[in-house]
Image: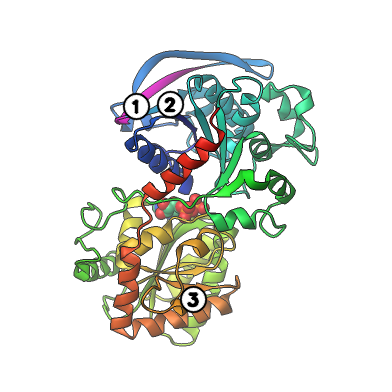
Amino acid sequence: MNIFHVSSEVFPYSKTGGLADMTAALAKAQAVAGHEVTLVTPLYRGIRDQFEGIKPSDTQLSFPLGQAKKTATVWTHNPAENLTILFLDQPELFDRENVYGEDDDAERFIFFSKAATRLAKRADIIHAHDWQSALTMPLLSLGQAQIGTVFTIHNAAYQGRFGRDKFELTGLPDSFFNWQQLEFYDDINLLKGGVVFADLATTVSPRYAEELLTPEYGCGLEGVFQAKGSALTGVLNGVDYSEWNTNNNPHLVAPFSADAPEGKAANKTALQSELGLDEQPGLPLLGNISRFAEQKGIDILLDALEQQLAGGVAFQYTGLGSGDARLEQAMSDLAKRHPGRIAIRVGYDTALAHRIEAGCDFFVMPSRFEPCGLNQLYSLRYGAIPIVRETGGLKDSIIDLSQGDDTATGIKFEQPNSDALGQALGQAFKLYSDPSRLAKVRDNGMRADFSWFRTTTEYDRLYNTIRQ
Ligand code: ADP
């Protein structure tokens, strides 16, 4: 099959979150499975300097964006057999410090989607991801009926909603601006357009696909999701275990695995030393790596940590993340008040992310919602037992202690508040105090297999249902 992905982030070229990991890993796994895979993404600042193999192509694009006419060139990279990355080079729009959050994001990603549509000519399937590439779906509905279209919602809270004056940038007929298509309370909503026009909409876990149908999780689009019926399904993301591996990983001080777990202890000691935590191997070490956003429940985590500390519980915590300035400050203050026990790093650091996963005993994810979540999957393999709120992909991927030590891989809690998380932490500390139970649950998690084979097989099946 000839598969054409459209994504505003692709690891290792650009990344702000799970979207980058997912699109990179899915494209790679599909190429390994024998499909001819192309992935188009913007050429952001710095990418060309970092990756020598990126070469210019003859392809030039020129088309209107509202009243302006824009041109772009295309650069290519072939990181693996059957896999081509196309980089859309439009310096005025993409040679920027930030991937998102610019005043002209509407112009930037409407342009990106229009360009991607023009590049997708020979594909059997066009698979677009999130609001930044959603406009490809309505644009493709205007022609090229032989191409099957798939749109994946990685996070319905980010919709690409802009004032109606931006609609003219799309070049779509005015008739598309109606409440059943791209209009949303008099604004343009790109995510909605992607869902409505795709042959098939998917999201990144079966549970999140169900949650999207409810007002609690649908972010105002629950009616749109409901209307999709059986054409909206959830497929759990996989893990690229060649990237996220504990046996041969330059970021780790010692290799370890389910068959030889001893090396994990050295990673814990090294992490404690690196972060200025007391080097006490016997203390349970908790970790978290995430965007500091309402979604991730960092406020819930803060309260729960305060409660445990006030209660005199002996443990350590390390967090890596950035985002909401108030949460960054509050976490940093907590670390200052509890040196040796709490260590916070504000920022974005992939190497440290690997070391935290490898060094921690438990990984905490108190998310209010979580479409898939990747860190709990990485944690399983790295022997950091996940403590997760029972939502979305967290619910789908972790087996709770209540299911028995033979199968359990983590600890789940239901309510998004610090009391519920506190109880889960209590269970974790109890587990930690029983080394043979701890080893068994950790072993179950390290042996769990979330490789992309299962995920690509499911996408193959879905693609075949819509191929013309
Ligand atoms: P989301 O996409 O909602 O942010 P996911 O769990 O799906 O959450 O994916 C997050 C990805 O981004 C993971 O690979 C995680 O390790 C990475 N990540 C998030 N914050 C940081 C950070 N501060 N430093 C390094 N990696 C981070």
User: Residue 290 magenta-drawn?
Assistant: no
Quarter occupied by residue 135: top right
| Left or right: 429 as drawn, with respect to 175 | left
Q: What residue type is labelled 2?
A: Phe
Tag shown at residue 87: 2
Q: What residue type is labelled 1?
A: His
Q: Estimate the x, y position of residue 54 in percent, counting from the top left.
A: 33, 25
Q: Which of 160 and 447 is in front in this view?
A: 447
Q: Estimate the x, y position of residue 95 in percent, counting from the top left.
A: 47, 28
| Left or right: 58 as drawn, with respect to 270 | right
Residue at x-position 55% and y-position 55%: 206
Q: What residue type is labelled 3?
A: Leu
Look at mark 1 in the image and give the residue it sits on. Answer: 77
Question: Does residue 293 appear in the picture of this structure?
Answer: no
Look at mark 3 in the image and give the residue it sits on. Answer: 305
Q: What stretch is highlighted in magenta?
A: 72-81
| Left or right: 35 as drawn, with respect to 143 | left
Location of the C terminus (image quadrant): top right
Task: Provide the major secondary structure of the magenta segment.
Answer: strand
